[in-house]
């Protein structure tokens, strides 16, 4: 009954969300929930790939599939650094001559944001026979709704991000840019004031 209630509250593609669960041995697996809202794409994908392979467990072995179930929510709110939204391009080929297709990260986020995280995670996994089984343990949803509310969910806490201190040369350049912007703003306001004074003198 609980599974049916959770499924009825889910408004997405239920068949796609539950596909392949019967082929997974769920006994003893933990259900880890990753909230992608505000997270950097690469850092999030590296943590998911670690959990989905079972590398966070002391019993990890590269020839066994001991990873946990990973549920990713709010995939549409994932972030990227730099200019990757326009510079990162996904390529695929249809099989016909000259039919090399491409799509930018911005267009892919608008079309299907779940595929962005899926591709990032799968490309971090080793290319072996366990790859398909690990892919079935990854469930990604664009919003915060998912049909696994009846499971014992455990929210995953992302490790703190260590931001490197700004180098002295970069800090000096940033200070110079800020001063220049302030001077330009002051100069613009002074020019506006002079124009107003000239207009009032002409009017008198």
Image (spheres, helix red, strand yellow):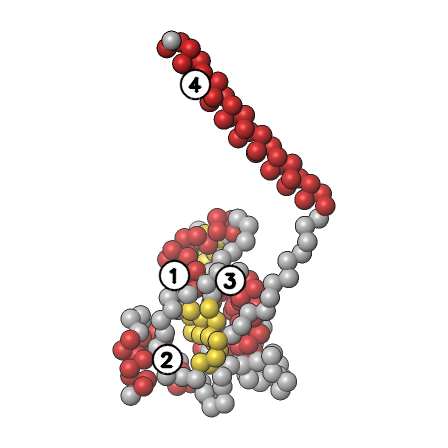
Label 4 SS: helix
Residue at horizontal 37%, vertical 10%?
A: 203
Q: Which mark is residue 39?
A: 3
The structure residue drawn at horizontal position 43% and vertical position 60%, both measured from the top left corner, is 77
- For the residue pair 179 and 45, the one nearer the viewer reads as 179
**Tags 1 and 2 in contact by the CB under 8 Å rule?**
no
- Precedes in sequence: disc 1 or disc 2: 1
Q: CA distance from mark 3 to mark 4?
A: 49 Å
Q: Is residue 123 visible?
A: no
Q: Mark 2 Cα within 10 Å, few/some/many (few <14, many 20+)?
A: some
Give the foreground label among 3 and 1: 3
Which numbered disc flags the more N-terminal residue, 2 or 3? Answer: 3
Of tags 3 and 4, the one toward the viewer is: 4
Q: Is residue 147 above or below residue 188?
A: below
The residue depicted at 35 percent of the width and 77 percent of the height is 147
Marks 1 and 2 sit apart, C-alpha to C-alpha, by 23 Å
| Quadrant for the N terminus in the image | bottom left
Mark 4 vs 1, N-terminal side: 1
Q: Name the image quarter holding residue 97.
A: bottom left
Label 3: state its secondary structure.
loop
State if disc 2 and disc 4 touch (CB < 8 Å). Answer: no
Q: Which residue is mark 4?
A: 196
Reading the image, the residue beneath label 1 is 112
Q: Taking 64 as reference, is 96 above or below it?
A: above
Towards the viewer: 196 or 179: 196
| SS label for mark 2 | loop
Which is nearer the eye, 184 or 70?
184
Callout 3–callout 4 Cβ contact below 8 Å: no
Q: Nearer the viewer, residue 181 or 149?
A: 181
Please provide percent x and percent y for residue 42.
55, 62
Q: Earlier in the sequence, mark 4 or mark 2?
A: 2
């Amino acid at each position: 009954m609980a599974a049916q209630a959770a499924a009825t509250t889910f408004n997405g593609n239920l068949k796609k969300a539950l596909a392949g669960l019967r082929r997974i041995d769920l006994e003893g697996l933990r259900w880890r929930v990753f909230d992608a809202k505000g997270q950097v794409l690469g850092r999030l994908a590296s943590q998911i790939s670690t959990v989905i392979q079972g590398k966070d467990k002391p019993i990890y072995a590269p020839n066994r599939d001991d990873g946990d179930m990973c549920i990713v929510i709010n995939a549409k709110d994932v972030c990227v650094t730099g200019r990757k939204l326009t510079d990162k391009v996904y390529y695929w080929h249809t099989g016909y001559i000259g039919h090399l297709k491409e799509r930018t990260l911005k267009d892919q986020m608008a079309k299907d944001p779940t595929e962005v995280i899926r591709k990032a995670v799968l490309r971090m996994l080793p290319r072996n026979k366990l790859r398909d089984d690990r892919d079935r343990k990854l469930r990604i949803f664009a919003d915060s709704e998912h049909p696994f509310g009846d499971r014992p969910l455990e929210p995953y806490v992302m490790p703190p991000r260590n931001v490197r201190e700004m180098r002295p040369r970069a800090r000096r350049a940033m200070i110079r840019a800020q001063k220049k912007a302030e001077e330009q703003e002051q100069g613009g306001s002074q020019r506006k004031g002079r124009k107003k004074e000239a207009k009032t003198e002409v009017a008198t």
